[in-house]
């Protein structure tokens, strides 16, 4: 594909995937409409960079554009905020947040070494269970965006809370592959 093809694909992503899914945050739309998503996938996958599906990059999920847009729209990121992106799916979502003026750190799944407080935590992939450390790094009133697995269905969810607990609100069902290491622990049942 040529540069013009990727530019057209980005424009189509905004018009045909993000806006119809209720993404109205103009900053998010502008960032996702200008940041070249194809630069965050391997060369052999560049043609699928704007497809409405998850990609596996570096062995980890990279959320479909619409799902990422829905979460970012609901998280309402603000310039100057501290963000943590959990996962290693190519770095696109971290780059979107950085282009919105946030300071971003990334971790593949363990608690960051510095343990600072984050206004926003974005988890790239579906999770069966959040580790306790997510709440310990969340600033008071901080927000978490994730695809939470509920009886085998991934639901895009936004959580508010802190170290005492996080309450989640479901936004939409999603097709987001599991994030390795975030599976639900087996529970004893009769």
Image: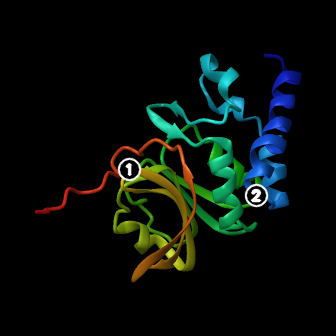
Residue 162 to residue 185: above or below? below
| Mark 1 Cα shell of 10 Å, populated few (<14), some (14-19), many (≥20) | few
Apparent side of residue 92 relative to residue 1 in the rendered image (left or right): left
Q: Is residue 163 left or right of residue 158?
A: left
> Image quarter for residue 92?
top right
Report whether 36 appears left or right of 148.
Answer: right
Q: Quadrant of residue 39?
A: top right
Farthest residue, direction front: 190
- Marks 1 and 2 sit apart, C-alpha to C-alpha, by 24 Å
Give the percent coordinates (x, y) of residue 31: 80, 49
Q: Secondary structure beneath disc 1? A: loop
Q: Which mark is residue 117?
A: none
Give x and y (percent) for residue 18.
76, 48
Q: Which residue is mark 2?
A: 22
Residue under numbered circle 1: 152
Mark 2: secondary structure: loop
Structural crowding at the residue carrying mark 2, measured as other residues with C-alpha within 10 Å and reported as few (<14), some (14–19) or many (≥20)? few
Q: How are the colours assigned in the image?
A: rainbow
Ranked by sequence position, the earlier of labels 1 and 2 is: 2
Residue at horizontal 13%, vertical 62%?
A: 188
What residue appears at the point 61 percent right and 57 percent down from the top-left corner? 104
Residue placed at 46% from the left, 37% from the top?
60
Compare residues 29 and 141 and report the one nearer the observer: 29
Choose between 58 and 169: the one closer to the eye.
169
Q: Is residue 21 above or below residue 44?
A: below
Whole-percent x, y for residue 101 in the image: 75, 60
Residue 136 vertical position relative to residue 106 in the rendered view, above or below: below
């Amino acid at each position: 594909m040529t540069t013009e093809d990727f530019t057209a694909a980005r424009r189509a992503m905004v018009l045909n995937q993000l806006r119809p899914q209720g993404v109205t945050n103009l900053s998010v739309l502008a960032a996702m409409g200008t940041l070249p998503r194809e630069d965050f996938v391997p060369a052999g996958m560049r043609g699928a960079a704007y497809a409405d599906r998850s990609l596996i990059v570096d062995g980890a999920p990279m959320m479909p554009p619409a799902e990422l847009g829905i979460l970012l729209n609901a998280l309402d990121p603000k310039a100057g905020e501290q963000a943590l992106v959990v996962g290693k799916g190519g770095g696109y979502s971290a780059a979107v947040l950085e282009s919105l003026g946030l300071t971003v750190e990334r971790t593949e799944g363990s608690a960051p070494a510095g343990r600072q407080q984050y206004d926003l935590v974005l988890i790239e992939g579906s999770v069966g269970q959040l580790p306790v450390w997510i709440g310990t790094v969340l600033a008071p009133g901080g927000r978490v965006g994730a695809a939470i697995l509920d009886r085998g269905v991934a639901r895009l969810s936004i959580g508010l809370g802190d170290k005492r607990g996080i309450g989640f609100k479901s936004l939409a069902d999603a097709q987001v592959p599991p994030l390795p290491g975030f599976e639900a622990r087996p529970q004893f049942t009769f």
